Amino acid sequence: MESTLKNVQISEKSKFLAAVFRYVFFFLLITAAVNAILGFVFLQLFPIQSFINSAAIGSGTYDPSSETYFGVYVGLLIGSGIFIFALMIWIMVVSFKGRGNLFVPFTLYAIAMGVLLSACTLFVPFETVAISLGITCLVFGLMFVIGYFAKVNTSILWMIVMGLFIGAALISVFNLIWMLVFPSTFDNLYWLVSFAVFGAMMLVTIIDVANMRRIAERGEGSRNVALFCAFNLYVDFIYMFIRILAIVARFSGRK
């Protein structure tokens, strides 16, 4: 009897973890698809590159229509940013109340994130994006292994995360003031902030994975709980990718 109960618990745990990763993969796929579609639309059908080159870089042939397309694109970015903020509130409210369906707001969030993420990937070479994605998968996988198999104290990790975020915020404010006096040091301080935030995001991923494991072990894995865990891992992956893309782009000279 005890053996049968244990087998049932293992089976339920496996189903819950499989559901979480299905959702993560599905919504990352939606984000990637929206990102790719926007890249095709605004670089091929309605090219905005000529306006950016002529206005920001001072080179290239100016196309008046590209300015209109660029305005539409910026409007999409602003709208998606506001929409993402509203969707995060929606997701949190549904999660804490324990009622409602997280699938719809999560889907909308993935679509809006695909629009917003295009600002980071639209003008970056494909090989840079591919390298950044590969590094992100490796780092994310390592953080998952640590969070799932290591007995981590999430309270201590949260204290470290808060310290890193607060430190990064203070350095950013100091950097803003300091660069007015010594502009050449701006880039060095930027790296401190970038790596501090990146380190914080890695720790947050470990915490989210550890919490997901505990939920699975307690047998509390409903569909909404699986979606909420998937949402946390999805956000961790996206923000980790953005940070890694920025680092790789700067090292490759794409500032």
Image (spheres, helix red, strand yellow):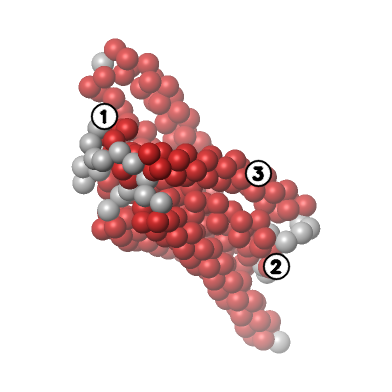
Along the horizontal axis of the image, is 7 left or right of 29? Answer: right
Say what amino acid the circle numbered 1 marks.
Answer: Asn
Residue displayed at 38% across by 20% down: 176
Total number of numbered discs in the rendering: 3
The image quarter containing residue 168 is: top left
Name the residue tied to disc 3.
86
Q: Identify the element where label 3 is drawn.
A: helix
Mark 3 or mark 1: whose residue is earlier in sequence: 3
Q: CA distance from mark 3 to mark 1?
A: 35 Å
* Viewer-nearest of discs 1 and 2: 1
User: Residue 124: x and y, percent?
Assistant: 30, 50
Q: Residues within 10 Å of mark 2 (few under 14, many from 20)?
A: few
Q: Nearer the viewer, mark 3 or mark 1?
A: 3
Mark 3 is surrounded, within 10 Å at the Cα level, by few (under 14), some (14 to 19) or many (20 or more) other residues, namely few
Give, as a three-letter code, the residue at label 2.
Ser
Q: Residue at x 36, y 56 (%)?
A: 44
Q: Residue furthest top?
A: 181
Mark 1 and mark 3 in contact (Cβ < 8 Å)? Answer: no
Identify the residue shown where x is 45% and y is 49%. Answer: 117
Q: Which mark is residue 12?
A: none
Instruction: Name the secondary structure under disc 2.
Output: loop
215 or 75, which lies in front?
75
Residue 113, given in percent of the width and then of the height, sits at 52, 51
Give me the C-alpha separation between circle 2 and circle 3.
24 Å
What type is the residue that disc 3 sits on? Ala
Q: Nearer the viewer, residue 70 or 207?
A: 70
Residue at which label 2 appears = 222
The residue beneath circle 1 is 188
Residue at (63% x, 62% y) in the render: 227
